[in-house]
């Protein structure tokens, strides 16, 4: 069953077209990696996919979207805002409820972030901010994850562990990754973006890192 699709989609910023025409289908259960040079259009493609089904997908944008003045607890809790009433959310913002704190603690513990539960997001390192955004996505009631470089600020072993967590937790994932080795290890389909279009779309088991090298040669002047 197809859970995400675009048909001859385009994206422009001002009068500059940066993506398309582009057609893609993502089936339920697929773990897709978007790879390609910086500026190829991966984030733009994730944005188009998100616009198709905003209501029931978890999104981890590259800039993370954390509220800097709020604690890690509050930022992670926000993953569930849409599932609760405004009154409940307000009450929990002012005085966090014990079971909500327990749920967030359970998510943060394996991410090694428990000691930062009440730290403001603005006082975290880049890697800690990324793990907070991962926790917020895990706290969302969603089966599909769209993520833009979710582990770029993390060291090797932690990046591996979090990629494993994300691809196991969410039924379907589309993740933009600079690290092609990580993409090949954790995703079952590789979609290579080049100059605003799909230049490669293959199962990971048929590919090696060398096969993806052409995606990273200098983009054309139009990109
Ligand atoms: N807000 C914007 N205004 C104008 N142009 C933009 C904007 N955002 C992106 N672009 C342009 O659109 C193209 C695609 O950008 P996009 O961010 O989708 O690439 P990307 O593959 O995600 O890059 P990276 O790997 O560096 O995140 C680039 O040429 C970029 O300069």
Image (cartoon, rainbow, N blue to C red):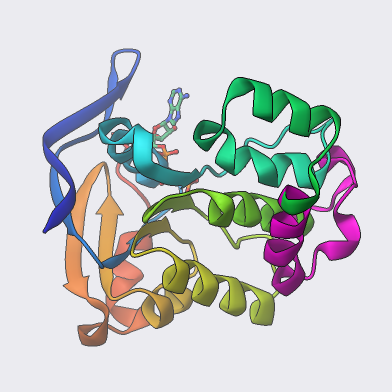
**Residue 136 drawn at (x, y percent):** 62, 49
- Above or below, 180 relative to 78: below
**Residue 115 drawn at (x, y percent):** 90, 62
Quarter of the image where one finds residue 63: top right
Q: Depth check: 123 or 83 in front? A: 83
Q: Quadrant of ligand 1?
A: top left
- Above or below, 19 relative to 126: above
Residue 183 belongs to magenta span: no
**Residue 141 drawn at (x, y percent):** 46, 49
Quarter of the image where one finds residue 94: top right
**Residue 103 drawn at (x, y percent):** 69, 57
User: Which residue is painted at 31% across and 84% down in the image?
Assistant: 208
Q: Main secondary structure of the magenta part?
A: helix
Residue 101 belongs to magenta span: yes
User: Which residue is painted at 63% across and 35% down in the image?
Assistant: 65
Say whether residue 52 is left or right of residue 181: left
Say whether residue 5 is left or right of residue 81: left
The magenta region covers 100-126
Specify the quadrant that holds the C terminus.
top left
Quarter of the image where one finds residue 86: top right
Can residue 162 be spotted in the picture? yes
Can residue 40 be spotted in the picture? no
Specify the quadrant that holds the N terminus.
bottom left
User: Which residue is painted at 71% across and 41% down in the image?
Assistant: 75
Say whether residue 220 is left or right of residue 181: left
User: Which residue is painted at 34% across and 48% down in the image?
Assistant: 219
């Amino acid at each position: 069953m197809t859970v995400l699709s675009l048909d001859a989609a385009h994206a422009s910023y001002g009068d500059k077209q940066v993506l398309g025409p582009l057609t893609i289908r993502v089936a339920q259960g697929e773990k897709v990696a978007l790879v390609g040079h910086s500026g190829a259009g991966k984030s733009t493609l994730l944005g188009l996919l998100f616009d198709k089904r905003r209501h029931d997908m978890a999104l981890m944008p590259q800039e993370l979207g954390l509220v800097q003045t709020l604690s890690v607890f509050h930022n992670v809790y926000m993953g569930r805002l849409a599932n609760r009433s405004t009154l409940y959310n307000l009450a929990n913002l002012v005085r966090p409820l014990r079971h909500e704190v327990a749920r967030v603690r359970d998510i943060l513990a394996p991410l090694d972030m428990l000691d930062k539960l009440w730290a403001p997001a603005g006082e975290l390192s880049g890697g800690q901010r990324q793990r907070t955004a991962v926790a917020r996505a895990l706290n969302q009631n969603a089966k599909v994850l769209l993520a833009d470089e979710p582990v770029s600020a993390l060291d090797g072993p932690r990046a591996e562990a979090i990629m494993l967590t994300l691809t196991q937790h969410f039924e379907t994932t589309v993740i933009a990754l600079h690290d092609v080795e990580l993409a090949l290890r954790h995703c079952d389909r590789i979609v290579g973006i080049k100059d605003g279009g799909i230049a490669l779309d293959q199962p990971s088991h048929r590919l090696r890192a060398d096969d993806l090298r052409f995606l990273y040669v200098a983009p054309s002047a139009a990109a």
